[in-house]
Image (cartoon, grey):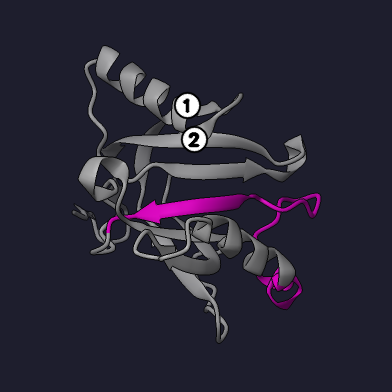
């Protein structure tokens, strides 16, 4: 999957609120009208999708630290990479990776563990932060994307680490 951009509200696991991710989504959704025209859409005008994008605290898109419990999260919508973030919004460009992915049918934490087990079973390793994708064309069905290999950035002709 090539690099992609997400525009949304950012938070950290260092938040003192145990429902901080839920609050990020509430804030993103309640102000979505401010950015709706910036959202990436397909040829029929459908939204490309919503992402719970994740990265390590150093923003290198490595897996969350401390057994996947410490990192940053961006609750947002996919936008064209060249789009500028308006005031009050945060834009991330998630680098290109090869992913294993699957739909979440139940508890997301269980799905993460099952995904990690499948990666190990296939002799692969997690090479970046896990990403959540919510598909508008499937009533918001959630998918988890497990990066297994970082791809080269075609513009720079080198791998970004």
Q: Give the range drawn in magenta.
A: 31-56
Name which residue lies at 74% across and 35% down: 138
User: Is residue 141 found left or right of 96 in the rendered image?
Assistant: right
Q: Nearer the viewer, residue 79 or 142?
A: 142
Marks 1 & 2, CB-CB < 8 Å contact? yes
Name which residue lies at 23% across and 28% down: 125
Name which residue lies at 18% across and 54% down: 161
In the picture as drawn, the residue positioned furthest to the bottom comes out as: 87
Tell me the crowding category of disc 2: few under 14, some 14 to 19, or many 20 or more residues within 10 angstroms, Cα based: many
Picture quadrant where residue 156 is located: bottom left
Mark yes or no: residue 53 visible: yes
Picture quadrant where residue 92 is located: bottom left
According to the picture, the residue beneath numbered tag 1 turns out to be: 111
72, above or below 132, in the image: below
According to the picture, the residue beneath numbered tag 2 turns out to be: 144
Mark number displayed over residue 32: none
34, above or below 87, in the image: above
| Magenta stretch encompasses residue 133 | no
Q: SS at mark 1?
A: helix
Name which residue lies at 38% across and 34% down: 146
Where does residue 90 sit, x and y in percent of width and height?
A: 49, 74
Q: SS at mark 2?
A: strand
């Amino acid at each position: 999957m090539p690099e992609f951009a997400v525009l949304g509200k950012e938070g950290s696991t260092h938040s003192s609120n145990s429902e901080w991710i839920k609050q990020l989504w509430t804030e993103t959704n309640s102000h979505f009208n401010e950015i709706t025209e910036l959202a990436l859409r397909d040829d029929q005008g459908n939204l490309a999708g919503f992402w719970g994008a994740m990265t390590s605290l150093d923003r290198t898109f490595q897996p969350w630290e401390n057994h996947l419990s410490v990192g940053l999260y961006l609750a947002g919508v996919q936008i064209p990479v060249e789009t500028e973030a308006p005031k009050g919004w945060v834009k991330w460009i998630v680098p290109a990776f090869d992913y294993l992915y699957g739909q979440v049918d139940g508890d997301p934490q269980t799905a993460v563990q099952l995904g990690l087990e499948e990666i190990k079973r296939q002799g692969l390793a997690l090479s970046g932060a896990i990403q959540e994708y919510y598909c508008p064309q499937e009533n918001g069905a959630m998918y988890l994307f497990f990066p297994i290999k970082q791809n080269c950035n075609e513009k720079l002709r080198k791998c970004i680490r």
